[in-house]
Amino acid sequence: MVKAKKRLGVLTGGGDCPGLNAVIRAVVKTAENEYNAEVIGFFDGYEGLVENRFRPIDMKDAPGLLTRGGTILGTSNRADPFHYPVLEGDDYVHLDRSNQAIFNFESLGLDVLIAIGGDGTMAASAGLAAKGLRVVGVPKTIDNDLAGTDVTFGFDSALVTATDAIDKIHTTAQSHHRVMIVEVMGRYAGWLALGSGLAGGGDIVLIPEFPYDIEAVCDQVKLRKSQGKNFSIVVVGEGAKALGGEMVVQRRVKNSPDAIRLGGISNRLASQIEGLLNVECRVTILGHLLRGGTPSAFDRLLATQLGVKAVHLAMQGEIGRMVSWRHNEAESVPIDDVAGKLRLVTPKHPWVKTAESIGVCLGVPAGISIEKYLTEMVHQ
């Protein structure tokens, strides 16, 4: 009797980023080359699994995927199977469609689902795994904020894009003697702002983890001017907030599991600086530019290795786990350990220590360490 081929499902959930197609390519190639297995791709994240929208993916789809941004399967950040938006009349209601997702998975004869996504996708995957779905997660996000992994693919590509933008902002800042504020994505984590701020030569870097003191920010601008530097570059994460203040919410999406859409802190910061110093500020919000384009060489390598590891886990029966990149190699962690947790910048991180050593202002008064500032002024 001929043994039936193994069948793997794959989907891409949450916000898109460079490297998603590289993972899909690695999954298809590894499944076919090493296990003679079939791959089924679901459209638009968990939405495709709930609604049973899919197509086979094979070697014919692989050419060109390594360098292609976005995802050929599409994605959705509103498709939580446990909180699924359904239009009734003129409004949406949210229903539990997890059983439907599992039924569709079983009906297709799939052995394992490979779910590529961020914290929302991992949380949904953990919930489905608890109900019996055989799933392996692959971490992606430009925010770099997933627990259980040292880095996520997509982050390096966004870092390159943000750094290139800051490089270009420098010349116009110097020419017009302005304070230029560059706002980057990252939600509640400051990895992208801190990394691009350091790599791009930012003078002031403000991140969500460390509420900024506006007086300290202005003092840095004044100090630079006293040294003959008539411009300043401020890099700010979209989730940053002033000491005692709140994050700036651009809008709320009522039919989304994560309804808050951050954005606009840079405009508030510009108003604060102009009001206190009477200097001209200009704002650049990079926004979704950071999600687009070709993946960097690092992300191509990382995404490929994570995709290969995911297939090996799936075929070896190691389910209910998320592939992770730790100690410079692909490992895995229980997906339950990742769901609902964020990896944030800490005061002891080497990037923070580096910023302090080279005189980058992190929104803290001069002469006070981040740790002391958080203890005495933020958490008092």
Image (cartoon, helix red, strand yellow):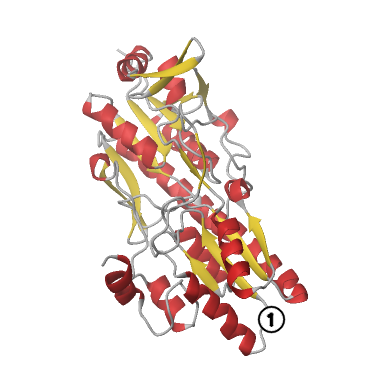
Q: Residue at x 32, y 32 (%)?
A: 125
Residue 318 shown left or right of residue 195 in the figure: left
Q: Which quadrant does the N terminus fall into? A: top left
- Residue 83: % across, % down: 36, 24
Q: Is residue 80 above or below residue 219?
A: above
Is 121 drawn above or below residue 169 in the view shown? above
- Residue 357 lies, with reference to residue 246, above or below; the image says below
Picture quarter with the C terminus: bottom left
Under circle 1, the secondary element is: loop
**Vertical position of residue 158 compared to residue 111: above or below:** below
Residue holding disc 1: 230
Judged left or right of residue 293, residue 304 is: left
Quarter of the rendering containing residue 203 = bottom right
The answer, for residue 180, to whether it is visible in the render is yes
> Percent x, y for residue 366?
43, 83
Q: The residue under label 1 is which amino acid type?
A: Asn
Q: Is residue 311 visible?
A: no
Taking depth in this image into account, of 143 and 49 the one nearest to the observer is 143
